Image (spheres, rainbow, N blue to C red):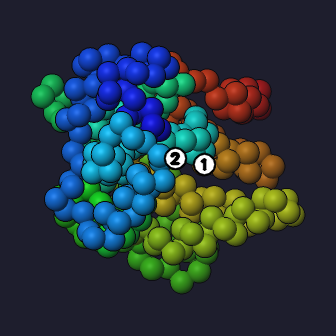
Amino acid sequence: MLIKICNYMDKGKDESVDIFSISKKLHFESLVSHMDKLSAGEIVELRLKAEASGITTHSIEQQVEILSKFRRNNFTIYDFDLFEVGSGTFCLGSMLNHSCVPNAVLIYQKREMIVLALRDIKENEEIFISYIDPINPYDSRCKMLDKYYFKCTCDKCNLKLYPKFNSPSGLEDHVTKGMEILDRYKKVSNNLETCLGFYADFELYRSVSSILLEELESATNFGLCLGLIVVKVATLIIQYPKSHPLIGLESLVGAKICWNCQQYPLGRKFLEIGNDCHSVYIDYHVNDELVKLNNLYKDL
C-alpha cells in the first residue's frame, strides 16, 4: 500500500493507480498525520517500516508521514457478517467524526464505503460513526481513542459508567433483567432510554459470549444457550446504537436457539429485533438466514 500511494502521489508513475482522481489526491494530502504528536517510539517504528519498503522516490520523512496518515485514518473493512476482511483509507469517510453512540454505521461493497443511518437524522444534525467498539468500558474506550488525540464527549462518555444492571447474583437474575430489555427494545427511540436503570457488565459479556460459543458447538444444552443469548443480546442493546447490525446478527442466533427449544414467542421477539436491524441495510444485502427464519416462524 505504501508503494502504491507513493507512486500515486508521484503523479501516476504506476499505471495501476489511475483510479485516483486529482480531487482524491488532494483529499489524501489533507488527511491529518499528527506528526507533531508522535512519540519517539512511534517515529522509530514508522521509520523502520519506511526503510524496509525500498522506496527511493520519496524521502524517509515523507514515507513516515504517509504511514502516520494510514494509522490515524484507516478503516477496518468488514463483510456483512461483520468478519474483518481488510483495511483501507477512505478520504471522505475520514471526515466523519466519532461518537460512542453513533447515528450511522459503515458497510462496504468491494472498494466502496457506504454510510448508513441507524435512525432518522435531522436536517443540520451531524453524522457520527464510531471509531472503536463501543461495547468497551469507559476507560478502555478513552485509551483506544488516544491514537486520534481527542477526548470523546458523547452522551455515553459523559455518563462515565453506563446505567446499571442491579448486579444480579446469578444467571437467572441476569436473564430476567435481559428479558425486560428485550421487551423495551421497540418501545423507545434510542438505547439511552432503553437501558435506563441497567448496566452491561463487560466481563459478564465476555464470559457469556465464551460459554455460549462452547455450548453451541457441543449442542447439548439449548436451555442454557437460551439464557446466555438473552443476556448477550440485552447487553448489545444497551451498548450499541439501536438497529446496529451486530444486534441483528446475534438476535438471529437467539431466534435459532428458540426454535430448537420450541420457545416460539421469545423466538419471534428475537426475530422482530433482527428484522428491525436488517432493515437498515436491506437495500445492499439480503440475509438468507433471516429470510429462512421468517418463513419458519410464519408457518407456525
Q: Based on the displayed image, in which of its 4 quarters is residue 141 positioned?
A: bottom left
For the question of whether residue 5 can be seen, the reply is yes
| Position in image of residue 253 (x %, y %) | 67, 47
For the question of whether residue 152 can be seen, the reply is no
Q: Amino acid at mark 2?
A: Ile
- Relative horizontal placement of residue 75, taking residue 250 as reference (left or right): left
Q: Number of numbered discs present?
A: 2
**Label 2 – label 1 distance at C-alpha:** 5 Å
Q: What residue is drawn where x is 57% and y is 69%? A: 206
- Residue closer to the observer: 42 or 125: 42
Q: Which residue is mark 2?
A: 247
- Residue closer to the observer: 152 or 149: 149
Tell me: residue 287, above or below residue 156: above
Q: Residues within 10 Å of mark 2 (few under 14, many from 20)?
A: many
- Relative horizontal placement of residue 176, taking residue 124 as reference (left or right): right
Q: Residues within 10 Å of mark 1 (few under 14, many from 20)?
A: some
Do residues under tags 2 and 1 come within 8 Å of each other at their CB atoms?
Answer: yes
- Quadrant assignment for the C terminus: top right
Q: Which residue is mark 1?
A: 250
- Residue closer to the observer: 178 or 280: 280
